[in-house]
Image (cartoon, helix red, strand yellow):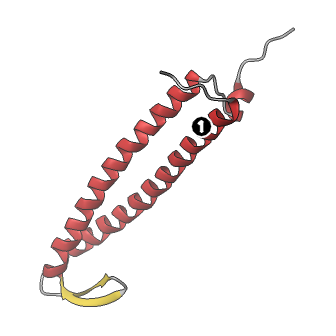
Amino acid sequence: MTEKLDQREIVERFQAMCNQQTQLSSKLAELEAERAEHELVLETLEKTPDSRKCFRLIGGVLIERTVKEVFPAVKQNESNLCKIIGELQEELNKIIIDISEYKQKYNIMTQEEYLARPRQVV
């Protein structure tokens, strides 16, 4: 059974879906930046001798370790970030599809789409 929604409810659901898409996109951008930082650190550590001292920030506390101790942990963190980014990207893709289907179902046009549509000459 399909539920009957009034125009206000349709718009509210659409806006909620768009807000969810925006939040996911922001989180993805944040995680991508963090992954890039990890990648840069890993590139630097690969060129550094294993016995050299380095410092790692854990929970706001700077810990002194060796490159040999820190490298695997940073590598694991980067791997975890890549996994999370992939999962969030899949979720974002699903939301984009859902929004597209919702727009089509209820004949919704964003302001940009409305202004960009071809005009009929009378």
Seen in the image, is 87 located left or right of residue 93? left
Which residue type carries mark 1? Phe
| Residue with the most extreme top position | 122
Above or below, comparing residue 48 to residue 93 in the picture = below
Quarter holding the C terminus is: top right
Seen in the image, is 70 located left or right of residue 58? left
Q: Position of residue 29 (x, y in %)?
A: 45, 56
Above or below, comparing residue 9 to residue 34 in the picture = above
Q: Residue at x 71, y 34 (%)?
A: 111
Q: Position of residue 28 (x, y in %)?
A: 43, 54
State how many labels appear. 1
Q: Residue at x 26, y 53 (%)?
A: 83
Report which quarter residue 10 is drawn in.
Answer: top right
Return the residue nearer the eye: 53 or 11. Answer: 11
Above or below, comparing residue 33 to residue 59 in the picture = above
Q: Which residue is mark 1?
A: 14
Q: Is residue 49 visible?
A: no
Dot 1 falls on a residue whose secondary structure is helix
Q: Is residue 83 visible?
A: yes
Q: Residue at x 51, y 53 (%)?
A: 23
Seen in the image, is 33 located left or right of residue 121? left
Return the residue nearer the eye: 61 or 53. Answer: 61
Report which quarter residue 91 is drawn in.
Answer: top left
Q: Position of residue 7 (x, y in %)?
A: 69, 30
Q: Position of residue 31 (x, y in %)?
A: 39, 60
Return the residue nearer the eye: 107 or 45. Answer: 107
How busy is the neighbourhood of tag 1: few (under 14 within 10 Å), some, or many (20 plus)?
Answer: some
| Residue with the most extreme right position | 122
Above or below, comparing residue 116 to residue 64 in the picture = above
